[in-house]
Image (cartoon, rainbow, N blue to C red):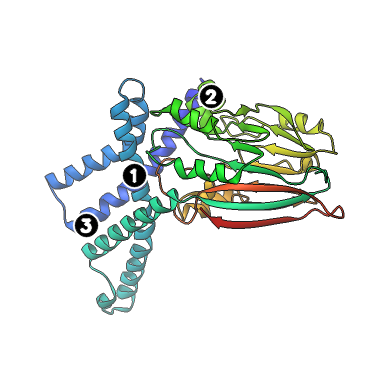
Amino acid sequence: MASLSRWVIFLTAFFCIYGSLHLYILIKVRRALYLDGWSYILLVVVLLFLMTAPVNARMLTQGYPIFSLVLTWIGYLWMAYLFLFVCLALPLDLYHLIVSGLQQLFNVDWTNIMMLRRNNLALVAICAGGAMIYGAYAAYHVRIEQVTLTSDKIPDTVGRVRLVQISDLHLGPMLYPGRLHPILAAIRKAQPDILVSTGDLIDGPFRGEQEVAAELRALPTKIGKFAVSGNHEHYFGIEKSMDFTRAAGFKPLRGERVDGGNGIVLVGVDDTLDGHPNSGKENELLSGLSTEQFSILLKHRPVFNGNRTGYFDLQLSGHAHNGQIFPFTLIVKLFYPMSDGLYHIAEKHYLYASRGTGTWGPPIRVLAPPEITIIDLMPAKGGKSVAKPRQTDQ
């Protein structure tokens, strides 16, 4: 019953917000093209189809997988285009609204600094299409983020320990052929000692699950692969998600810790379906750690309990995608201030938030490029801990 209530609330909010965007574009297109009669009715029907496509695709997943796949692609590509269109159109419309108001207030004619509605519509439509093309290119080209952390907890005899973090890969129906190849190649090139996935590895059924799992399983690591769940593993079904995670060669850390050797211990906590912090289990796990080992907390959401920073050295998170499509980045920052890069949260304690390796929904990214993170843990010289982030392109 609680799960049903959450979905009702989600769908109500979704259609209120998403529906308002469609209403805006309906009014804008009708006024620009002077639609009436059957042409206007056709536009309403098309917009209703596009607005409901993501939800209908989800409902058709079991019995009609092909229709579901087609609807998924149509729905999410339109979602991205609509969002970009509205973000570009609103400033222009606000400008024209202000100029029109000033014309009436001062009884002047400023039509020469205003655009015709049809030209306004065409300009925004073309720019939104260009942003879509750029976003698709950016989503495919994964950046390599490199961070070096030194700690007196890493023995001098060990030398460097290399962690590679992937996050929010979102394997599902939007996965297209060739998308994984550069990601897998970059991970192999990095030669990780430890590979970690900080949630949302999978969020829906897709063709070739076994083949993709085998490719991930074949990635070589010296110590092992570890993963925690994200919210989308719960949406898809936590047990199905964990079965895929294991098939991909990762050991799920669901409220447990594991000794990685070389002075390192990893702790992983499940994400929760309602998004509330799993603080009880987290505190229990962290309180039992040895202060002589370098402790790494794998946690999907980039939030932390300020009273518990002393129990871990590094937290690895994802979830926020840094907004994925600007200017959504600005909204995400309100909820997750730490959503991109390395943060020094206390003396010798750090949190790294990945922008995510894949994409949720639309396969595009605008000013929030995907990443694979390489974290080199080094013995401290003179007992001094240092953090050095560096970025390269893949």
Residue pictured at 63% horizontal, 50% vertical: 338
Kindly give the residue lying farthest to the right in the view shown. 382
| Residue highlighted by disc 2 | 247
Whether residue 55 is visible, yes or no, is: yes
Label 3: few (<14), some (14–19) or many (≥20) C-alpha neighbours in 10 Å = some
Q: Quadrant of residue 220?
A: top right
Amino acid type of the residue that numbered disc 1 sits on in the rendered structure: Leu
Q: Position of residue 4 (x, y in %)?
A: 47, 23
Secondary element at image label 1: helix
Marks 2 and 3, how far apart at CA: 54 Å
Q: Which residue is mark 1?
A: 77
Confirm whether residue 359 shows in the render. no
The outermost residue toward the left is 38
- Tag of residue 150: none
Along the line of sight, which residue is nearer the eye, 231 or 150?
150
Eye-nearest disc, 1 or 2: 2
Q: CA distance from mark 1 to mark 3?
A: 25 Å
Left or right: residue 363 versus residue 37 is: right
Amino acid carrying label 2: it is: Ala
Q: Are marks 1 and 2 in contact (CB under 8 Å)?
A: no
From the viewer's perspective, is residue 366 above or below residue 302? Answer: below
Name the quadrant containing residue 87. Answer: bottom left
At x 57%, y 51%, the residue is 334
Q: Quadrant of residue 262?
A: top right
